């Protein structure tokens, strides 16, 4: 079995504020294999982006990594000094941001930004770096790259800029890319192109990707596995087919139920009543318990661990290998599981 | 680009015309120029003849036209008090004011920029806090008070630097005199330049700090960090360049006010510049000098504005497009 590229164990991220310490990420664990795309979904504020920032080492004060481990190819990177971390950023781990319109420095030519990044991380000379920059632009699908390389960001369309952003992330052939809502700011037709591009790069280069989004359509199309986050915790994680088709966690069920489909003649979309708790006010036990329809006593006192074995409920689909859920509902051993 | 420049020049000309009108109106309404020129015992016919020869009996619009025509040839008449052409008086004193103003501006820009960048990057250090506190003093203390305090400390108590005058000057070309080439000239420049530039320095420092903090929060700086670029390159390349755009405007416009406000500093330090000349002119109702000075300051502001607008295009590629269309 191959080693995971990124391994996150029991990660905790806290923000120190005047009102006290807010725990934005609380005990998050997952692995991502080479060439695998892990989709991370959840509402705004669920901790998706913070997890990405923590992996790439860009949590800014007052935020801090308060516990847990992040390993890159088995080596811890969460406790490195800033300079060593900088050398990893861009070279081993790259990040793609949400808004391509603001991710590029408006005063620098696209080529300058690419060449600077290449020169920082490789031994190439300026001429070779420029040639590589042109290759990269070509690879991400920018037409006439040898001409466009001297353009300024404002001369590119949104989709083209996101391609430039991806090219910038690929400069040093990283092993892992955090894509933080890479398609949210784009037109639907352009979204599909960007997703296809990320997918292709992933396949061809064996790059692992953590794809943060709240677009389930994007997840279904792109991800191999998906993690559903709620209030800074992983509620459910598993192969994308299983989680999207047969979500187990009541929150995940609600989330999937809120997606409109054309085939299903649904009367109304399912809503999850209430809203996500504030970080300062996360309830005891399961963070979802005040909104959960199937809540019972244990949910209010004991926090469910996603890593304990779970079992499918009677009359529902059995749990597949690799499908984990942090919910007490599936603890009762009333039914023998399929596997 | 050319159309943009031409349009801006036309606008500048309109502004100058308005300034000229105000300068011209001073002649009409601030006392009778003839009374300033003649003695008490001058016969009435003599006065009338003078009035006619100066064209003061012509319609106002004709007089204004003549004023503009003369102004275009840099002819602002003869000073009442010195009996010399105003242009020559101003030209004699312009080098003193300009050298002082540019030294003050350079001081304000360089020191303000360095302090501002430092305060933004090391926001929580004690030195940054100290700079912030000092900048408050600089913004709130009036110029003349700073000047007097500096004179007291460095000229009276410590005796390090001269308290007034320009020191020894060297003549360059026909009319330019410079204090840059002699030790006494440079020493004399220090206190007035600091006095004149201190306010602008603190202003630029606070502006640079605020702008840079703003820029450091932008996505492209985060993305630059995520790409693992060197900290030096992020701070002094990516961030500083974006910080400088608004700073150029303010600093440019401030240069105009440095020249205009040199009046106070020149008075405090008895600096033989245009400001001192203007102040004497006000005391003696020497309208030609006042009018010429007004026109000159107006022209400086308009020119600096024009230059600032054109520099934008050099720094910000996005504006080059806007200028072209």
Image (cartoon, coloured by chain):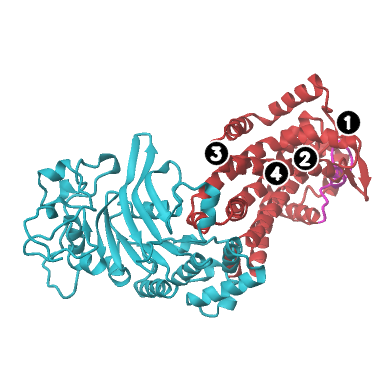
Chain colours: A cyan, B red
Residue on which the image places disc 2? B287
Q: Residue A243's quadrant in the figure?
A: bottom left
**Whether labels 3 and 2 share one chain:** yes
Q: Which residues are magenta?
A: B73-89
In front: label 3 or label 4: 3
Point out the tag, 3 or 4, that comes first from the N-terminus: 4
Chain bearing mark 2: B
Residue on which the image places disc 1? B41
Point out the tag, 3 or 1, that comes first from the N-terminus: 1
Please, which residue is most extreme toward the front here?
Answer: A1
Q: Is residue A216 above or below residue A249?
A: below
Chain bearing mark 1: B
- Is residue A45 visible from the viewing direction of this image? no
Tell me how far mark 3 sits from mark 1, CA to CA.
71 Å
Seen from the viewer's position, the closer of residues B38 and B65 is: B65
Please, which residue is most extreme toward the top here?
Answer: B157
Q: Position of residue B150 (x, y in %)?
A: 74, 26
Chain bearing mark 4: B
Per the image, label 4 sits on a secondary structure element best described as helix
**Whether labels 3 and 1 share one chain:** yes
**Side of A335 where A100 appears, left or right:** right
**Whether labels 1 and 2 share one chain:** yes
Q: Position of residue B156 (x, y in %)?
A: 80, 20
Do labels 3 and 4 touch, CB within 8 Å? no
Which numbered tag is attached to residue B110? 4
- Is residue B159 visible from the viewing direction of this image? yes
């Amino acid at each position: 079995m191959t080693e995971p590229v990124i391994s996150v164990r029991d990660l905790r991220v806290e923000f120190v504020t005047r009102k006290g310490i807010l725990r934005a990420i609380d005990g998050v664990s997952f692995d991502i294999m080479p060439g695998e795309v892990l989709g991370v979904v959840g509402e705004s504020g669920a901790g998706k982006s913070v997890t990405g920032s923590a992996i790439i080492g860009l949590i800014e004060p007052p935020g801090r990594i308060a516990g847990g481990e992040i390993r890159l190819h088995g080596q811890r990177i969460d406790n490195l000094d800033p300079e060593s971390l900088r050398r990893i950023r861009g070279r081993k781990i790259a990040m793609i941001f949400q808004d391509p319109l603001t991710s590029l420095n408006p005063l620098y030519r696209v080529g300058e930004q690419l060449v600077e990044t290449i020169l920082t991380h490789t031994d190439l000379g300026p001429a070779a770096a420029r040639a590589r920059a042109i290759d990269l632009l070509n690879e991400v699908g920018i037409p006439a790259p040898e001409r466009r390389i001297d353009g300024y960001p404002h001369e590119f369309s949104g989709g083209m800029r996101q391609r430039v952003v991806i090219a910038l992330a690929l400069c040093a052939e990283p092993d892992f890319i955090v894509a933080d809502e890479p398609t949210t700011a784009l037109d639907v037709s352009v979204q599909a192109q960007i997703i296809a591009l990320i997918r292709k790069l992933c396949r061809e280069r064996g790059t692992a990707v953590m794809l943060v989004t709240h677009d389930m359509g994007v997840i279904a199309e792109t991800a191999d596995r998906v993690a559903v986050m709620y209030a800074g915790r992983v509620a459910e994680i598993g192969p994308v087919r299983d989680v999207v088709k047969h979500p187990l966690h009541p929150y995940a069920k609600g989330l999937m139920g809120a997606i409109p489909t054309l085939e299903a003649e649904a009367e109304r979309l399912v809503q999850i009543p209430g809203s996500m708790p504030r970080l300062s006010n996360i309830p005891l036990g399961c963070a979802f318990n005040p909104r959960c329809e199937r809540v019972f006593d244990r949910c209010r006192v004991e926090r469910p661990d996603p890593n304990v074995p779970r079992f499918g409920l009677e009359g529902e689909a059995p749990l597949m290998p690799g499908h984990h859920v942090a919910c007490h509902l599936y603890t009762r051993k009333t039914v023998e599981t399929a596997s | 680009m050319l159309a943009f420049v031409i349009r801006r020049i036309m606008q500048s000309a309109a502004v100058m015309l308005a300034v000229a009108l105000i300068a011209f109106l001073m002649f009409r309404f601030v006392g009778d120029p003839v009374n300033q020129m003649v003695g008490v015992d001058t016969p009435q016919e003599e006065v009338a003849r003078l009035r006619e020869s100066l064209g003061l009996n012509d319609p106002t619009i004709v007089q204004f036209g003549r004023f503009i025509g003369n102004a275009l040839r840099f002819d602002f008449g003869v000073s009442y008090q010195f009996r010399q052409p105003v242009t020559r008086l101003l030209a004699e004193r312009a080098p003193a004011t300009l050298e002082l103003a540019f030294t003050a501006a350079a001081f304000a820009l360089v020191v303000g920029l360095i302090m501002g960048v430092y305060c933004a990057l090391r926001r929580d250090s004690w030195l940054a806090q100290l700079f912030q506190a000092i900048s408050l003093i600089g913004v709130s203390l009036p110029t003349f008070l700073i000047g007097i305090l500096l004179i007291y400390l460095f000229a009276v108590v410590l005796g390090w630097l001269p308290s007034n005058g320009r020191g020894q000057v060297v003549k360059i070309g026909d009319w330019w005199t410079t204090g840059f080439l002699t030790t006494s000239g440079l020493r004399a420049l220090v206190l007035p330049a600091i006095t004149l530039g201190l306010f602008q320095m603190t202003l630029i420092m606070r502006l640079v700090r605020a702008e840079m903090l703003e820029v450091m929060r932008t996505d492209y700086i985060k993305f630059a960090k995520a790409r693992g670029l060197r900290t030096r390159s992020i701070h002094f390349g990516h961030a500083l360049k974006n910080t400088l755009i608004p700073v150029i405007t303010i600093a440019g416009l401030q240069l105009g006010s440095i020249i205009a406000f040199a009046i106070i500093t020149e008075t405090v330090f008895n600096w033989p510049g245009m400001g001192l000349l203007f102040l004497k002119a006000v005391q003696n109702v020497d309208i030609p000098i006042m009018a010429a000075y007004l026109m000159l300051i107006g022209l400086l502001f308009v020119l600096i504005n024009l230059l600032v607008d054109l520099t934008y295009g050099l720094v910000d590629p996005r504006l080059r497009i806007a200028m072209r269309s």
